[in-house]
Image (cartoon, grey):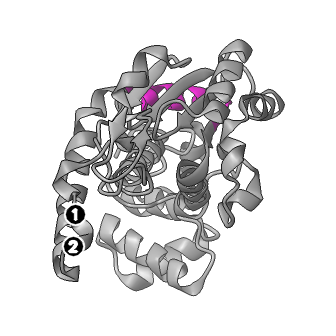
Amino acid sequence: MNRDAEGPAVRVDAPTERTNERTRDIDLLPTLDVLRVLNAEDRTVPEAVGRSLPDLARAVDRAVAALRGGGRVHYVGAGTSGRLAVLDAAELIPTYNVPADWVVAHQAGGAGAFQKPVENAEDDAEAGAAVVRAEVAAGDFVLGLTASGRTPYVLGALRAAREIGAGTALMSANPESAGDAPADLTIAVDTGPEPIAGSTRMKAGTAQKLVLTSFSTAVMIRMGRTYSNLMVSLLATNAKLRGRTVEILREATAASEDECARALTAADGDLKTALVHLLTGAEVPRAAAALTAADGRVRDALRTLGS
């Protein structure tokens, strides 16, 4: 139990709920000092994430194996965790031109909870299990996200996923919950007490954002959706992105803007095909065939063509 100096006893369920001594009496500070204190707390998060990278790498490899085997990756979360998951999954589609069902986010309370909180939805373990039974197949990979590590909706989903035969991982900000997690892997990022006790949209939320973007980016890299550090699978859906495809080709090949534009036209706008064509000199149909044989991985296609 944690007893505030001027308040009642409060049950402590996770490190994020505990009182942060570094921010006590923050409400007495001038505005700039409030922000400095918050910024100092935020700067501890990347280091905490860094300590979890070996576990995160194992989750990435499991997710890649699921996708290569024809399965899908599922995010399951509630509240802030669920909203961050929805954002991450949605942004992969235009950035890496992946099928919409490669990475699917499931949020407690459904789609409406993205804009309007449905706080009691996180307590429904059976609802989490039901979503998984309806949407997840054996061979998929399910990543549960919960700051406390104990959210019933997420734990119910993970238990159901294991019963189905899907791979599972739990990402939380509570190392104390790792031993009890119904998951094959745990990614426990020890962000400690929040600046405002229990406000897990702060450091815990920042950690989840960092973990999610690193996780999904690493998965996309392993799946061949990049060439070097370039977004060669980019889905060009507007004028800005169409211009970016030309710039990506120029960066990757050192060809002129006109050469890149012509290559894109010849490849019917397919950036990877144009890239392989420009780098190897192979005719567009041969470049496209090499990419198909390489399952879209540019490096493998280049090796096939002897470049």
Residue under label 1, please give it: 25
Q: Position of residue 158 (x, y in %)?
A: 63, 25
Which of the two residues, 124 or 60, is positioned nearer the viewer here?
Answer: 124
Q: Position of residue 272 (x, y in %)?
A: 51, 58
Q: Is residue 167 visible?
A: yes
Label 1: how many Cα within 10 Å (few below 14, some 14–19, many 20+): few
Q: Position of residue 132 (x, y in %)?
A: 75, 30
**Label 1 element class:** loop
- Identify whether 286 is placed above or below 130: below
Q: In the rendered structure, does residue 70 fall within the stretch colored magenta?
A: yes
Which of the two residues, 194 or 67, is positioned nearer the viewer here?
Answer: 194
Q: Position of residue 44 (x, y in %)?
A: 20, 50
Question: Does residue 140 appear to the left or right of 62 in the view shown?
Answer: right
- Residue 231, by quadrant, is bottom left
- Identify whether 272 is placed above or below 198: below
Residue under label 2, please give it: 28
Q: In the rendered structure, does residue 285 fall within the stretch colored magenta?
A: no
Q: Is residue 306 visible?
A: no
Which amino acid does the dot numbered 2 rest on? Leu
Which of the two residues, 13 or 153, is positioned nearer the viewer here?
Answer: 13
Q: Residue at x 54, y 79 (%)?
A: 242
Mark 1 and mark 2: span between their CA atoms?
6 Å
- Identify whether 222 is placed above or below 141: below
**Label 2 element class:** helix
State whether the magenta stretch is mostly helix, strand or loop.
Answer: helix
Q: Residue at x 23, y 66 (%)?
A: 26
Question: Does residue 191 appear to the left or right of 184 in the view shown?
Answer: left
Which of the two residues, 158 or 288, is positioned nearer the viewer here?
Answer: 158
Extent of the magenta region: 58-73
Label pair 1/2, CB-CB below 8 angstroms: yes
Which amino acid does the dot numbered 1 rest on? Asp
